Amino acid sequence: MRVPRQALARLASPVVVLAVWQIVSAAGLVSERTVPAPSTIADTALELFRDGTLVEAILTSVQRAGAGFLAGAVAGVGLALIAGLSRLGEHAVDPIMQMLRALPLFGLIPLFILWFGIGEAPKVALVALGVAFPLYLNTFAGIRGVDGKLAEVAHVLRLSRIGLVFHIVLPGALPQALVGLRQSLGLAWLALIVAEQINASSGLGFMINNAREFLRTDIVVLGLIVYAALGLLTDAIVRLLERRALTWRKGFLS
Amino acid sequence: MAEGLPVLTADTGTDAGSDPGSGRVAARVRGLTKRFGERTVLDGVDLTIERGEFVALLGRSGSGKSTLLRALAGLDRDTGGELAVDGTVSVAFQEPRLVPWKRVWANVALGLRTDRPRADAERALGEVGLTERGGAWPLTLSGGEAQRASLARALVREPGLLLLDEPFSALDALTRITMHRLVLDLWEKHGPGLLLVTHDVDEALLLADRVLVLDEGRIAHESRVNLPRPRHRDHPDLIGLRSTLLTTLGVTPEGTA
């Protein structure tokens, strides 16, 4: 199979940057303590992978992010359904969500430490909160944005209320909910990184902070690269999900 | 706001005597009124549509013709007067209003309570000449195809009353001619009472048994067209009727020919 010329062209500049970075480091123009050479980082990665440190740190962080995401997603989507599908639910849920939304996420950290201590709970709670709001706002907007004309069609076709929800409202809200999912995953990683900076005895954040104590810039940079890779991975998963779930949209057809 | 309780009956239990021209009533409206605030949109409309009868309803925009159709479709219950419909009511809207995330056949089968909804949907798609497109996504259909799918969705329910809300107005002239023939074929085959809301006088004259003009919420004119189909637009009877209708609609025929 022929590699598309476009893909090759896009690969060229990162490769050049990496090469220049390696040469500059090797020539001793930049100290290893400021920015280590790509080869040093690769060696460190291999070393930490072999002794299990890296895998353990990743697993710990992914578990936190996963637990927080799950809790936040259930809360966000659940509340959006309650608020979106009935006026009573909207009056009950939406004002509170709009008020809570105004609170700065990371400003809550001292409160969370007071409430939950410094174990896993405050980290998971911070991720959950970061996830819940974008999902809530987008799913709610998606439900309310469903074309009223299609609701009329459902009425004329004598669909039940449950039929209306499952055939029209929820599929109609899905594109906007998926936008919310991407936003919330971005926030999930961000919240995790911040939470892990403040107090952690395990995980990627701990690995990075520990490395800082010992002036191991290579491990700090490695940790950042792993965070970025995890973010890209979840984003790719959502994009795959979108392609699967939204094939009916014209833009996805070709 | 409502002057009286609207009576809405949908008797789906009896299907005997539904053959065209049997004189069975598909829809009966008595003194139907509708107000939006201060504005009276329907001002005591009386209308009876029989099974197998093709009625065209003309009117300028704002004359209340869409409001009348929506009342008959059960989309607007906040009306005064009496309204009774016999059998299922189906609607094909101006925009086809297909559900974009359901394939064409699933759109036709949506809400269908038969033993084999998919098979019935595919048969209905066959009737409108869309057999090949059953598995397609609605957004990939052309305007004419989408409107035919919408017709299939309306007809697969075997309605006693079929409401068409300007379904051809967004189509190009050639597609419209094809669609006119298709609607006539399907109407003759299934025999529902049919109400076509349109602002196209020629369309009404070519298709309908009876042409009504709605003006300021009242039926201002009614004509029977007793010509065999297919009709020609320059038939002498139609030329006379056309100018009468245009005058009723407030258009001088000379200026629009």
Image: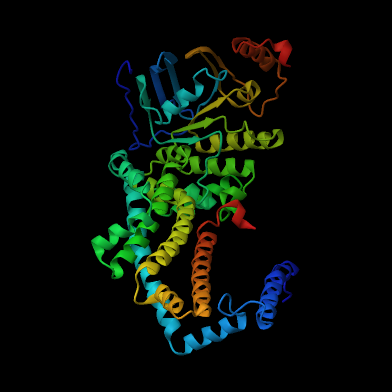
Scheme of image coloration: rainbow
Query: Which residue occupies the foreground of this view, B106 or A68?
Result: A68
Q: Is residue B112 visible?
A: no
Judge whether A254 appears above or below B148 on screen.
below
Q: Is residue B147 left or right of residue B46?
A: right
Image coords of residue B240 (percent x, y): 67, 12
Image coords of residue B193 (percent x, y): 48, 29
Image coords of residue B96 (percent x, y): 55, 39
Say which residue appears at 40% left-offset and 22% top-offset: B28
Judge whether B181 appears above or below B77 on screen.
below
Say which residue appears at 36% left-offset and 70% top-offset: A64
Judge whether B213 appears above or below B190 on screen.
above
Image coords of residue B106 (percent x, y): 49, 52
Say which residue appears at 30% left-offset and 44% top-offset: A96
Judge whether A125 appears above or below A29 on screen.
above
Image-quadrant location for residue A254:
bottom right
Query: Which residue occupies the foreground of this view, B88 or A93?
Result: A93
Q: The N terminus of chain A lies in which quarter of the figure?
A: bottom right
Query: Which residue occupies the foreground of this view, B120 or A74?
Result: A74
Q: How many marks?
A: 0
Q: Is residue A20 visible?
A: yes
Image-quadrant location for residue A69:
bottom left
Q: Is residue A223 left or right of residue B246?
A: left
Q: Is residue B151 left or right of residue B50?
A: right
